[in-house]
Image (cartoon, rainbow, N blue to C red):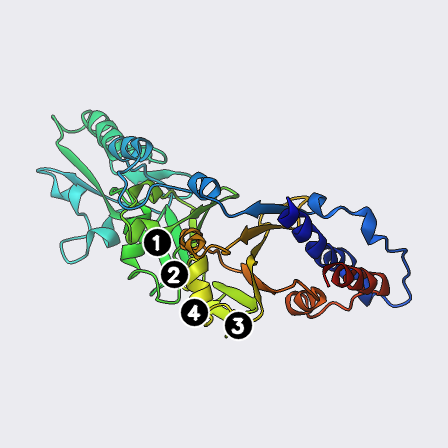
């Protein structure tokens, strides 16, 4: 309880800076700042790093089977023709219908183009509606209608050129391009493979699938590296698959460590213990072993500004908990001094563009006085 109260006192200036920073740049504006009226526990969630907390974060690792939903979609998949597709139609024993343009031209050149209205013209029978139909349905209709002119017509229908349905791949892939939807179902794994995989600088953990105005975040890392097939998806026409850059995949380590700074994560996730180790370890002369904090901003819209996780390594064995605490991009790791003092320094590091109004500076001084 004492640690939580202390963290609440420490985070008050940070919350005040976040709330009041926008006013600091408005010339001539004036407000009565009353930071003491905004309890820090209403703005920040404070969580000690415990075995119980880490247990709630455990998720299946390694290979996972394909989901039943995706398996059912793949088994039931049938391509349906659309405008822009070119159909190749063979009527056996009737070359005048099969290839009226001669044998020197490809099926895509002499095939039957499905027009914008969803139909194509065929000799003898006229217009045939093809949009939204399977190849078997088109073949059956052609056979039925040609039977008026040909005895027992034997008809074969295939797609010579797939132009109607497409998905779009963008971002950090070897060859950003448009991929056609064909008679073979196109999954996320297939799409990435067709463009030559993701670049080394890609963020494999947060690939975005945009569909019908909805966005889904998928871990390509779990799918490709760990074999988690539950991350795979059947792509549909109009889907946009974006692979972002990993350039903002970093954590900041500040305070009483030997080499403070920013540590890039890339695609390999890092634990809290790893981050402290890569920063040269804790400065044992000045650090407070109970004051290792991870400040994590809220991603989704929320009344909370951040969640602060506290690791107490008064007992060195507690570093095993830090070894299970996986950091996320843009986390801030801060190691406090002993005794805790001058959290206005933290604010100046985290929010360098904000000039603290006088009342907020006074609040920082008050906290410093309490802890000295």
State the separation of the CA atoms marked 2 and 1. Answer: 8 Å
Residue 351 in the image: above or below residue 98: below
- The disc at residue 261 is 3
Graded by Cα atoms within 10 Å as few (under 14), some (14 to 19) or many (20 or more), the crowding at tag 3 reads some
Residue 300 in the image: above or below residue 27: above
- The disc at residue 267 is 2
State the separation of the CA atoms marked 1 and 4. Answer: 23 Å
Residue 265 in the image: above or below residue 77: below
- Image location (x, y in percent) of residue 142: 23, 31
In terms of secondary structure, where does tag 1 sit? helix
Report if the CB atoms under discs 2 and 1 are less than 8 Å apart.
yes
Q: Which residue is mark 1?
A: 221
- Image location (x, y in percent) of residue 203: 42, 60
Residue 204 shows up from this direction: yes
Residue 81 in the image: above or below residue 3: above
Q: Which residue is mark 4?
A: 278
Residue 146 falls in which quadrant of the image?
top left
State the separation of the CA atoms marked 2 and 3. Answer: 19 Å
- Left or right: residue 296 versus residue 324 is right
State the separation of the CA atoms marked 3 and 1. Answer: 26 Å
Report if the CB atoms under discs 3 and 4 are less than 8 Å apart.
no
Report if the CB atoms under discs 4 and 2 are less than 8 Å apart.
no
Q: Residue at x 18, y 57 (%)?
A: 105
- Image location (x, y in percent) of residue 62: 28, 46
Quadrant where the N terminus is found in the figure: top right
């Amino acid at each position: 309880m004492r640690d939580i109260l202390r963290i609440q006192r420490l985070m008050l200036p940070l919350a005040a800076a976040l709330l009041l920073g926008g006013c600091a740049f408005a010339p001539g504006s004036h407000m009565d700042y009353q930071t003491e009226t905004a309890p820090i526990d209403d703005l920040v969630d404070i969580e000690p790093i415990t075995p119980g907390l880490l247990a709630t974060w455990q998720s299946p690792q390694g290979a996972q089977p394909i989901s039943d939903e995706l398996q059912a979609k793949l088994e039931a998949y049938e391509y349906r023709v659309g405008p822009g597709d070119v159909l190749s139609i063979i009527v056996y024993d009737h070359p005048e219908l099969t290839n009226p343009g001669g044998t020197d031209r490809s099926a895509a050149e002499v095939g039957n183009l499905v027009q914008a209205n969803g139909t194509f013209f065929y000799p003898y029978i006229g217009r045939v509606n093809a949009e939204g139909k399977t190849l078997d349905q088109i073949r059956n209709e052609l056979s039925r209608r040609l039977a008026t002119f040909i005895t027992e017509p034997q008809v074969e229908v295939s797609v010579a050129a797939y132009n109607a349905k497409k998905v779009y791949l963008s971002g950090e892939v070897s060859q950003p391009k448009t991929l056609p939807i064909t008679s073979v179902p196109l999954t996320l794994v297939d799409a990435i493979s067709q463009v030559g995989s993701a670049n080394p600088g890609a963020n494999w953990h947060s690939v975005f699938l945009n569909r019908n105005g909805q966005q889904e975040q998928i871990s390509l890392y779990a799918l490709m590296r760990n074999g988690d097939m539950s991350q795979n998806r059947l792509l549909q026409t109009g889907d946009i698959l974006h692979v972002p850059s990993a350039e903002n995949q970093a954590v900041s380590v500040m305070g009483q460590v030997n080499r403070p700074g920013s540590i890039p994560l890339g695609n390999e996730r890092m634990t809290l213990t790893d981050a402290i180790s890569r920063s040269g370890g804790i400065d044992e002369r000045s650090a407070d072993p109970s004051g290792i904090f991870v400040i994590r901003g809220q991603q989704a819209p929320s009344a909370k500004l951040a969640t602060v996780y506290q690791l107490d390594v008064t007992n060195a064995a507690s570093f095993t908990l830090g070894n299970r605490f996986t950091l996320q991009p843009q986390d801030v790791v801060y190691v406090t001094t002993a005794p805790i003092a001058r959290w206005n320094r933290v604010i100046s590091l985290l929010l360098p563009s904000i000039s603290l109004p006088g009342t907020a500076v006074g609040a920082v001084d008050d906290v410093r006085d309490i802890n000295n």
